Image (spheres, helix red, strand yellow):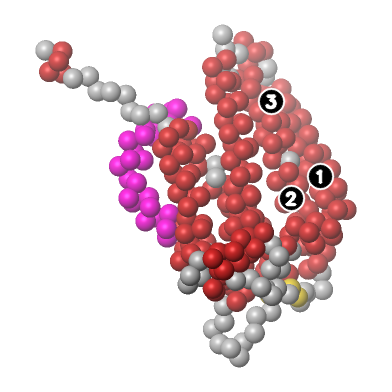
């Protein structure tokens, strides 16, 4: 049985009060995480955020092995690679410290934020809807963090290395500002986290009957072209880098096709006659 009786017992203002309570809890959670991360941010910057600036980063070491063992890939070698950042505005370092602490708090607190929102929505759902929502919650969190990891370990380092080494003229050296670095870092990492929610969106639309597995099969060739363009837009670098980004994104497409149910079979009118 659903929860219509519970909903009828609560007035509009009671619903509003319940929502306000949830939002307050979310704010307290994010503020607490932001303060904790603000305190730990100097070490996080050195060991995590600025790690792709050095040739010892895990992806660069893997590319070094490819450069050594695969003919024609010598340009992937990252020996001696290093990116120096500069600060050109008086208050930038403080505001970068604050904003990065908040956005990282949002990442680490993402499961708790979604859970708190879930506690507000849950009373309005039926038992079968709750089971589906729980699976969506677990899948959504898992895919979000996988996307963040792909953005951090693959997409951002590839993008950084390309743009840091790109010169329109040898007379124009690159001096990368802290603001530019952090903006690109946060946008790419979070964008990949959001992109990896695509299978969840496809699953929800499939449950609603909007998407079917046949749709993915029919438009696979179109999707490959679109995803290649998207990968090139994210990392307008060499073909190898584009493929490195394209593969996980295309994997999301195939995963979505797998988890979406096929269209129901159409009855054969001739057989009925």
Q: Which residue is mark 3?
A: 119
Q: Which residue is mark 2?
A: 104
**Rendered image quadrant of residue 162:** bottom right
- For image coordinates 37% across by 56% down, the residue present is 225
- Dividing the image into 4 quarters, which one contains the N terminus? top right
Q: Earlier in the sequence, mark 1 or mark 3?
A: 1
Please tell me whether mark 2 sits on a helix, a strand or a loop.
helix
Residue furthest to the right in view is: 39
Per the picture, the main secondary structure of the magenta-coloured stretch is: helix
Please tell me whether mark 1 sits on a helix, a strand or a loop.
helix
Label 2 with label 3: CB-CB less than 8 Å: no
Residue mark closest to the camera, 1 vs 3: 1
Real-space Cα separation, disc 2 to disc 3, in angstroms = 23 Å
Label 2 with label 1: CB-CB less than 8 Å: yes
Part of the protein shown in magenta: 204-229
> Vertical placement of 59 versus 136: above or below?
below
**Rendered image quadrant of residue 188:** bottom right
Side (left or right) of 171 relative to 82: left
Q: Earlier in the sequence, mark 2 or mark 3?
A: 2
Judge whether residue 208 is colored magenta.
yes
The percent coordinates of residue 166 (x first, y second) are 57, 78
- Asked whether residue 188 appears in the rendered view, the answer is no
Please tell me whether mark 3 sits on a helix, a strand or a loop.
helix
Task: Determine which of the numbered discs, if any, sits on residue 33 in the image.
Answer: 1
- For image coordinates 76% across by 47% down, the residue present is 105
């Amino acid at each position: 049985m659903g929860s219509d009786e519970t909903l009828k017992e609560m007035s509009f203002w009671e619903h509003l009060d319940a929502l306000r309570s949830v939002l307050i809890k979310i704010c307290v959670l994010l503020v607490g995480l932001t303060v904790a991360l603000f305190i730990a941010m100097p070490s996080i910057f050195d060991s995590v955020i600025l790690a792709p600036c050095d040739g010892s980063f895990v992806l660069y070491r893997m590319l070094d092995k490819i450069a050594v063992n695969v003919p024609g890939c010598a340009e992937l070698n990252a020996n001696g690679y290093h990116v120096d950042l500069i600060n050109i505005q008086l208050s930038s370092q403080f505001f970068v410290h604050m904003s990065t602490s908040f956005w990282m708090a949002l990442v680490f607190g993402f499961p708790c934020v979604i859970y708190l929102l879930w506690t507000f929505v849950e009373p309005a759902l039926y038992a079968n809807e709750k089971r589906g929502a729980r699976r969506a919650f677990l899948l959504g969190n898992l895919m979000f963090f996988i996307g963040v990891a792909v953005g951090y370990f693959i997409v951002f380092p590839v993008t950084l290395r390309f743009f840091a080494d790109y010169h329109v003229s040898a007379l124009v050296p690159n001096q990368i500002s802290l603001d530019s670095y952090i903006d690109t870092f946060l946008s790419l990492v979070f964008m990949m986290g959001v992109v990896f929610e695509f299978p969840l969106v496809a699953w929800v639309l499939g449950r609603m009957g909007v998407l079917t597995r046949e749709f993915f099969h029919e438009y696979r060739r179109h999707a490959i072209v679109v995803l290649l363009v998207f990968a090139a837009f994210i990392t307008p670098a060499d073909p190898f880098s584009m493929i490195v980004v394209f593969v996980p994104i295309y994997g999301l497409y195939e995963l979505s096709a797998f988890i979406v149910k096929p269209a129901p079979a159409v009855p054969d009118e001739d057989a009925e006659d």
